[in-house]
Image (cartoon, rainbow, N blue to C red):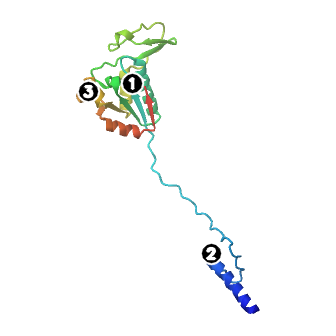
Amino acid sequence: MKTLIAVAAALLLVGGAAAQGRAPAPGQPAPAQGAQAPLAPPQQMQPAQQGQKTAAVVVHLTEFGSDLHRVQMALSTASALQARGTPVTLLLDVNGVHLADRGTPLDMAQLHVGGGLTVAQGQGAPQDEIQPVVGGGSTANTLESLYQQFVSGGGQVIVRQHCASMAGIDRGALRQGARLVNDREIADVLAGANRVIDY
């Protein structure tokens, strides 16, 4: 009778080890019934290979003749970002499309004189915005030079086709470096941008 009890106890121990997916090693005591098997060490997780998104900024300009300061700030910001190695796209719509029109003079610039506001006189400056430059002031870059600097540095200029059409600007009237785009193309550019700056 004692022998039968001993055999039954041994079978229970072996069965418990087998249920956990392993047999007890020779000379090793079998784990108690219901005991958890030791967990295998966690595998080293490799970082997922992800395609790096190119840093991109869209500078969105909607104004032109009614707010030259805004135009100049948009171009200056675009060029400053470009100088840091950031790919920049200048998006022109609403009244901003006039910046890309070769028929629109760009020989004008905002000036800062003694902390006060001025608008430089130029052939293309709107008459209601021309202010006399008094005292010693530093002349700013004209819109023409800022635009050329941006384009020559590799900047992209896209013009919303609908707005250009409303302003009477066709493909043949565009400045160097500018191109007409439809709404779907604009959506693609905006969706791929890391940041959009509105002026």
Q: Which mark is residue 146?
A: 1
Q: In this view of the protein, can residue 198 be seen by the observer?
A: yes
Q: Residue at x 34, y 19 (%)?
A: 106
Residue 41 found in image quarter:
bottom right
Q: CA distance from mark 1 to mark 3?
A: 25 Å
Q: Residues within 10 Å of mark 3 (few under 14, many from 20)?
A: few
Please, what is the three-letter code of the amino acid marked with disc 3?
A: Ser
Tell me the mark number nearer the camera, choosing from 2 and 3.
2
Q: Residue at x 40, y 18 (%)?
A: 68
Q: Nearer the viewer, mark 2 or mark 1?
A: 2
| Residue closest to the eye, 27 or 30 | 30
Q: Which residue is mark 3?
A: 165
| Up-down relation of residue 16 to residue 97 (above or below) | below
Q: Which quadrant does the C terminus fall into?
A: top left
Q: Secondary structure at mark 3?
A: helix
- In the image: residue 89, left or right of residue 135: left
Quarter of the image where one finds residue 132: top left
Three-letter code for the amino acid on which mark 2 is drawn: Gln
Which residue position is annotated with label 2? 20
Q: Residues within 10 Å of mark 2 (few under 14, many from 20)?
A: some
The disc at residue 176 is: none
Sequence order check: which comes first, mark 1 or mark 3? 1
Circle 1 — which element?
Answer: helix
* Dot 1 crowding, Cα within 10 Å, few <14, some 14–19, many 20+: many
